Amino acid sequence: MCAATAAARGRSVVVLEHGERPGRKIAISGGGRCNFTNLHTTAASFISANPDFCRSALARYTPLHFIALVERHGISWHEKDSGQLFCDRSAREIVAMLLAECGSGGVEVVPGCRVVRVEGAGRCAAPTSRGDFTVETNRGVFQCRSLVVATGGLSVPSLGTSDFGYRLARQFGLAVVEPRPALVPLTFGARKFEQFKDLAGVSLEAVVSCGKAQFAGAVLFTHRGLSGPAVLQVSSYWTPGAEITLDLSPGGAAADLLEAHRTSRQDLHNVLATLLPRRFAAAWAAAYGAAKPLRQFTPGQLAKIAEELHHWRVMPDATEGYRTAEVTVGGVDTAELSSKTMQARRVPGLYFVGEVVDVTGHLGGFNFQWAWASGHAAGEVA
């Protein structure tokens, strides 16, 4: 996006592509259909040490701009839940579209390019004037006036991701907010999750909270812990030692259900099975020592059970890490960059865009929209 935008201004542009082919992360996203943007994109959809940083770029390149580009290339699309837009056919159409945009501007793409060293005017220092970066690679030496770093985060290492962008930022004296996996399943120790270890594949609807962050959606039990959209969303806010809370019966249905059956001879888990998946209801009742008929509980005990169902507190041990994380929280400190141009304030000609920056979107196409918007912002001036 950045290369195509800059080339359209008449700039001579080279893309140094680490992979053997560009856009591999795009190609595998959205189950191969690419959730390429979200109609409801706002600054509130992103996590950053500076929540306002992304406003400028997002306002100047909106989802409607990208939709217009998609339609100009004849790519059909559809909307799923909550403004998520997907290709009708294949995510590879988005890759082809971006390469076509680059091609029309004469952009040169160099695949399989490994950067060995980057220098400014002084050895491994910032340039003294705009326009003298030297990039040494296994494919030759490149010199440029503007250097844009779009190397992404640490998620999905099987695609060749690395900390190169962070190391380069530090080389030029820029601060980096410590990266960590995000949009990632949460895991629990064997003893802590003993009663629920056989529930892999069971899913339920819940509201999941961590601190002030709260998301409604599906929760999926895995062999190691919890996943599903609501958990993935909360994982971006979770830090080790923090609890997450699940409302297993949003809207107060649990309290009403237990009150309606308080004289029943049925066991608790059979009653809960009308509200929750049967296997989970049985495991939950057993875990809380409540596997007996409802009529044997006092009103106070039933009220406590309802409260537990609405505020089920669990403490994860860890996440599944970058291997399964969709994105990386943290990155180049936004205080180091111009929100309008993405240029490093103290290093003229050096830009950082996309996931390598400390701006991380929620699940649902927001991270792609940030990639397009930040790339476009830099491409307009680089």
Image (cartoon, rainbow, N blue to C red):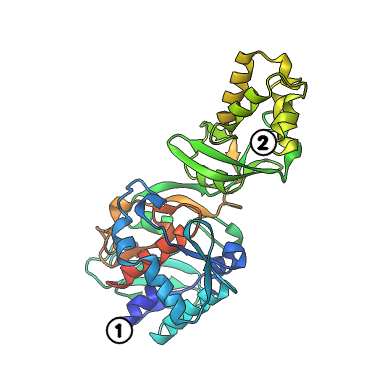
Q: CA distance from mark 1 to mark 2?
A: 61 Å
Of residues 24 and 127, the one drawn nearer to the viewer in this rendering: 24
Query: Can residue 195 be seen?
Result: no
> In the structure shown, which secondary structural element does the residue marked by tag 1 occupy?
loop
| Image location (x, y in percent) of residue 166 | 42, 55
Residue at x 73% of width, y 43% of height = 200
Left/right of residue 375 with respect to residue 270 in the rendered view: left
Name the quadrant containing residue 20. Answer: bottom right
Q: In terms of sequence position, does the residue under pointer 1 or pointer 2 come before the other?
A: 1
Of residues 350 and 196, the one drawn nearer to the viewer in this rendering: 196
Query: Can residue 15 be seen?
Result: yes
Quick one: label 2, few (<14), some, or many (20+) residues within 10 Å? some
Numbered disc in front, either 1 or 2: 2
**Are discs 1 and 2 less than 8 Å apart at CB?**
no
Residue 154 vertical position relative to residue 2 in the rendered view, above or below: above
Quick one: label 1, few (<14), some, or many (20+) residues within 10 Å? few
Mark 2: amino acid: Leu
Q: In this figure, which residue is indicated by the disc labeled 1? A: 10
Name the quadrant containing residue 275. Answer: top right
Q: In this figure, which residue is indicated by the disc labeled 2? A: 275
Residue at x 39% of width, y 47% of height = 177
